[in-house]
Image: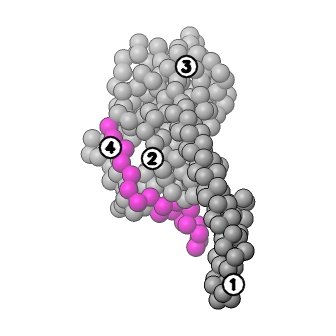
Amino acid sequence: MIYLENVTKSFGNRELLKINKLEIGDGEKVGIVGKNGAGKTSLINRILSNDENVRISGQAKIGYFSQDLSILDNEATVFQNVMNDTIQSEVTVRNILANLNIKGNDVYKKVGVLSGGERVKVSIAKLLVSDYNVLILDEPTNFLDIPSIEALEKLLREYKGTILLVTHDKTLINNIAQNLLIIEDKNIVEFEGNLEKYQEYKEKKKLVNKANLENDKLLLSMKISEIISKLSIEKDEGKRNELEQIYKELIEKKKDLLL
């Protein structure tokens, strides 16, 4: 549904993000994770930018949830906002709003009088009942309480289209995302699996690296001992100089491993 190749994001002369190749398939539910300022929102903006290096499938209809809630008409009611451009029945619309705890006469309130959390819910409902088949959600849990987040999780699990999700809510991203895009050191690492699987992978990798480090330390210590032994019996000055140079290099390597 979405294909990126040779995409970069820079600020002045400083490169913030580099994507060699990235493909997001139909129906994938992808979590975008990374530290604050890593480039998560920048990645979303590039996808939405119609950049020549970003190709969107002709079948893709993208709905975007942004934190500015710009898809809402403050002068229209909740019901009018959500029903506008919907492909669902009134019953389905009301059910989705009810799942998000917007019920009864609350659907006839103007959006402009709603709280931040209520406006988020209306925005999400509006996207879910539209004809979009790709949802890009940038921090949709802001202003939501725990029951509302749980309701959102249920709706996103049931959603049949493609989802790109940015959120600091680890539980939500773990339960929704089937694959991850991890932004680190200006690059994107793709991982098949949810956040829990990725954390397990990192722990295993850490243990392997630790074991390899200990093995490297042991081998260096053995080599150092061997050089010391040779130095103790070597009489030739030239060969001693060579051995002393090797000894110094091995000691430096050991210091690097201990850092």
Disc 3 + disc 1, Cβ < 8 Å:
no
Residue assigned mark 3: 151
Q: Is residue 132 above or below residue 18?
A: above
- In whole angstroms, how far apart are the C-alphas of marks 3 and 2? 28 Å
Residue 151, image quadrant: top right
- In whole angstroms, how far apart are the C-alphas of marks 4 and 3? 27 Å
At 69% from the left and 76% from the top, the residue drawn is: 233
Label 4: how many Cα within 10 Å (few below 14, some 14–19, many 20+) = some
Q: Which mark is residue 190?
A: 2
Task: Look at label 2 and name its amino acid.
Answer: Glu
- In whole angstroms, how far apart are the C-alphas of marks 4 and 2? 16 Å
State yes or no: residue 184 in magenta: no
**Which SS type dominates the magenta stretch?**
strand
Lower position in the chain sequence, tag 4 or tag 2: 4
Extreme-top residue of the structure: 104
Coordinates of residue 2 in the picture (x, y in percent): 35, 47
* Stretch in magenta: 8-26
Residue 88, image quadrant: top left
- Badge 1 element: loop
- Badge 4 element: loop
Lower position in the chain sequence, tag 4 or tag 3: 4
Residue assigned mark 1: 235
- Badge 2 element: strand
Nearest to the eye among marks 3 and 1: give it: 1
Coordinates of residue 257 in the picture (x, y in percent): 67, 60
Lower position in the chain sequence, tag 2 or tag 1: 2
Q: Which mark is residue 1?
A: 4
Disc 4 + disc 2, Cβ < 8 Å:
no
Task: Look at label 3 and name its amino acid.
Answer: Ala
- Badge 3 element: helix
Lower position in the chain sequence, tag 3 or tag 2: 3
At 60% from the left and 32% from the top, the residue drawn is: 170
